[in-house]
Amino acid sequence: MSEQKPEYNVTGQDYTDRRHFRYSGPPLIDIHSHVTMTAPSDGSTGAAGGSGREGSTEQAEVMLSEAREFGIARTVTMCPVQDIAPLREKFGDALVFNGMINKKKIDDSDDEAYKSLDAFLAEGIKILKLWSAPRGRERGLVVNAPWRIESIKRAIAAGVQVVMVHVGDPDNWWNTVYKETAKFGTKADQYLPFREMLERFPEVTWIGAHMGGNPEHPDELQRLLEDYPHLCLDTSATKWQVREISRHPEAIRNLITKFPDRFMFGSDLVTRYGLHKEHYTSRYWCQRTLFESHWSGTSPIADGDYVAAAGEPALPALRGIELPEEVLLKVYRLNALRILG
Ligand SMILES: [Zn+2]
């Protein structure tokens, strides 16, 4: 009988082995995470946090202390608005806040969304997040919904200069969750309203979360970056990036090196009640291994989305792309510093 291996380490990787790390510059900034207050009622997936002052900062402490172990001094978090004050009191400048405005149902009033926006603005968010994954369509969460256009205008008037967007999802989800393209659209369809918004608001910096939702296609990302100089991409969603970047490491290395000012380090780590410390460790270790080393082996993170193509190994690979030092400094730190102001 084989022992169940934890999702954060299916290969028995020694995460204290960091001899392959090359970066030795000033501290990193994680531009994309979900550090929240936590409580026993937290779900194991989906939206996180929201327990506010009733909740605990224990998981946030675990995560941020692991972050420091990997040289990360500041973390930008998306958390429910009631979590901001207790987190800020506890962690001060180590956290920066990104406000995600959503609707729970398609017929929720626009005013509800604006109220949520106002609450985030009152807490001094630096970034506005528009989560626009295809599975949000039923709730009207398309990126160019009129209430989102209005929200951006109001956020800009209040001094926000950065908008983060989640469009797209892994290619292979269109064989599973998004099979019904009449309902969800094709993957390419997701980028039309995104382009419209990039054109409508050239005065803000846009961040395409999770490598613009398209690490499968560096050529398409290059077109977006060429078309929109005010667009940046973050490297978050670690197992997705590990899986796809390792499939074409040269192409991604060339892309980042061609546009070194346009990529930002991000983990997409989410705090949840009861998570093991090594869950956080695994994502930081894999991100740094991927971008700064030539480490090559089996990815230590369990990946249910990996389907081995012909000639591929049974488990996904992690192949480091060893970015040049001056590019790493930008991706790890300077680009985020620039846009956060
Ligand atoms: Zn996220």
Image (spheres, rainbow, N blue to C red):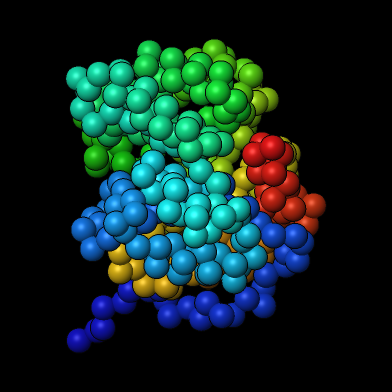
The residue lying toward the viewer, choosing from 283 and 337, is 337
Q: Which residue is drawn at 20% across and 27% down?
A: 105
Residue 145, percent from left and from top: 36, 17
For the C terminus, give its image quadrant. top right
Using the rendered view, name the quadrant where residue 149 is placed.
Answer: top left
The residue lying toward the viewer, choosing from 55 and 179, is 55
From the viewer's perspective, is 271 left or right of 67? left
Q: Where 258 sits versus 197, above or below?
A: below
Residue 32, percent from left and from top: 51, 47
- Check the image and name the residue furthest to the bottom: 1
Q: Where 315 sits versus 167, above or below?
A: below
Q: Is residue 195 visible?
A: no
Q: Which residue is drawn at 37% across and 16% down?
A: 147
Residue 14, percent from left and from top: 51, 81
From the viewer's perspective, is 291 left or right of 188? right
Q: Which residue is drawn at 62% across and 61% down?
A: 72
Residue 180, percent from left and from top: 21, 29
